[in-house]
Image (cartoon, grey):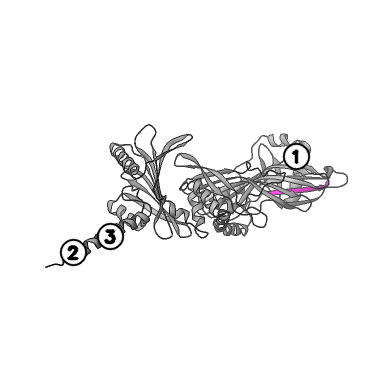
Amino acid sequence: MRNPRVIVLVVVLMVAGVFAFRQYRKHTESPFVLGYARAGQSYSALDAKLTEAERTDRSCVPIAAGYRICRGTTLAPQGDMTVVVDDRGRIAVLRQRVTELSDSTKQATSALLAAWNDENPGVVVKRAGQPDSTHWLSDDTNWSATMTLKRGAASLSEVVLTDERSIAAMNARTLPALLVLSREGLVSAGELDGVEQRRPGALARAAESLAATGRPLGDAAARLPACDPQPSLGIDAGMARRAALGESAAQLVTLAMAQLDPARRLELRDSVYLVDSAGVPELIDVTAPVALHGGTAYAFAVSYLGRAAAVGRNIQAFDAASCRAPAEVIVAKLDRSRTRIASIDRFVVDDESLASRVVGLRVTGDAKSPRLAVSTVGTYGASDWYGEVDWLRVADPDSLRVVESRPTALAKMDVRQRVAAVDLQAIDGGSSRAPSLAGRRVNAVVQSEGASSAHPIVLPAETGGRASGWAMLTVL
C-alpha cells in the first residue's frame, strides 16, 4: 500500500514544479503571443515551427555585437516578418506586417485584442498622419506589444512584440545594435531616451563604434587611382554656357585649362567639354571664376561629370569602384598687367569620396585673408549601399588646403531599396560657429516599401576634427 504522505508530497512537488515553470516562463517569455511567436523565446524554436508549417521564407544577417535581423515573407497570413535575435539567440523584437484583408485576419485580430486586453488593457497611441495604434505593457513592464489596424477595417496591419527588459539591459558592447534597430524603425525614440538617461553619452560612443566599420571603406577609396577620361557621345551645338559665363570669364577659364591640360582644348557649349587632338570630347563642368586679392587672382572649380557618372553606375549596381573622380579647385594668379596667367595651381577639396562635383563656389573672409566656400556633393558606395553627402567646405586659396568641412545633408539607398535622408542644416548650434555634429541625435526620413516615417539616428564623432562621409552613411 502506498504511503499517503508520499503521495501528498509528490502532488505538492508537481504543483510547485508547474508553478515554478510558469513563473520561469513568465519572466523569460512574453505573455503577448502572436501565432507561434513571442518575444523572449528562442529564435531556433520559432524557426523550427515556421519551417514545419512552411509559413515563411527567411534569411538572417548579422548587424552588430552578436545581434541578427531575420526577415522573410509570410504565407498565412500574407505579409512579412522581421525578427531581431539578440546575442543569446532569443527574440528581442518581432514585427509582423499583414497585407491581406480577409475574414480570417479579422478573426485573428479580434482574438488578439481580447487576449491582450485580458492581460492588460491597451492604450491607444495617436500618430499624426498615420493610423492609430494600441500599446500593451505587461504588469512587470518587461514585455510590450503594439498593434496597428488597417484604415477603416478591424484587421491588423502591423504587430510589434518587444522584450523591453532585453532592450533596457543593452550595454556598451551591444548598444551599436540598438542604433541599427532605431534606424530600421524597430525600436522607438523612447528606447533611446531611456538609454541616454541611464547612461549619458553611451549612444554617442555606440555611434562611434558602429561608424568605425565604415572607415576601412574610406581607406580603400583613398588608395584608388584617378579615373581615366570618359568619352562623351558628342558635342552639342549651343553656346549657352559661354554666354552665361561672359566673354572675359570664358577666356580666363579657357586659358587656365589650356595650361593645366595642354593636350586638350576647352569647349564651352550648352555643356562643357575637354576635347583631345582626335576630337574625342569628355563631359566636364566649370563654375564661374571668382576674384581673389582685388582681382590679382581668380578661382574656379572643375567637375569631371563623365568620370563621376561612370563611378556612379558602378556603385548603384553595388559593384566595387575601381577609380576615383574628385572635383578640383583651380587658382590662377595673374601677372602685373592682369592680362596673362603668371601661375596656376589646382587642389582637391573632397579627398575621401569616390566621386564629387562642385555645385557652388563663392568668396568669404576679408580682402587680406580670403576663403573659398565650396559646396560639393560627394558620392560613396559599398557592397550593400550607396549614398551622397552634401558638403560645405571652406578652403584657403593661398595654402591650397581645406580648413573646414561641414556636411549639410545625407542620403542613402541600400540593397533592399530602403532610402534614408537627413537634413543637417536645421541643426542650430546657437553661435556664429558651426555646431559639432558628433553624438547629435537627428531624425532620418526613411522611405521603405511604399511607406515614409522618421527614424532617430545618432551621428558619430569627428576624426581629427573632420566629419567622415563614410562614417555617417554607415550609421544612416
Quick check: 46 left or right of 329?
left
Q: Nearer the viewer, residue 151 or 6?
A: 6
The residue under label 2 is 7
Residue 441 position (above or below residue 124):
below
Q: Which callout, 1 or 2, points at the residue further toward the start of the chain? A: 2
Amino acid identity at mark 1: Ala
Give the magenta part as a residue range.
328-341
| Mark 3 vs mark 1, CA separation in Å | 92 Å
Verify whether residue 334 appears in magenta. yes
Q: Position of residue 236 (x, y in %)?
A: 64, 37
Quarter of the image containing the N terminus? bottom left
The residue under label 1 is 250
Q: Which callout, 3 or 1, points at the residue further toward the start of the chain? A: 3
| Local crowd size for mark 3, using a 10 Å CA cut-off: few (<14), some (14–19), many (≥20) | few
**Looking at the image, how many numbered discs can be counted on the residues?**
3
Between marks 3 and 1 in the image, the one whose residue lies nearer the viewer: 3
Amino acid identity at mark 3: Ala
Residue 16's tag is: 3
The kind of secondary structure element at disc 2 is helix
Q: Residue furthest left?
A: 1
Quick check: 28 left or right of 340?
left
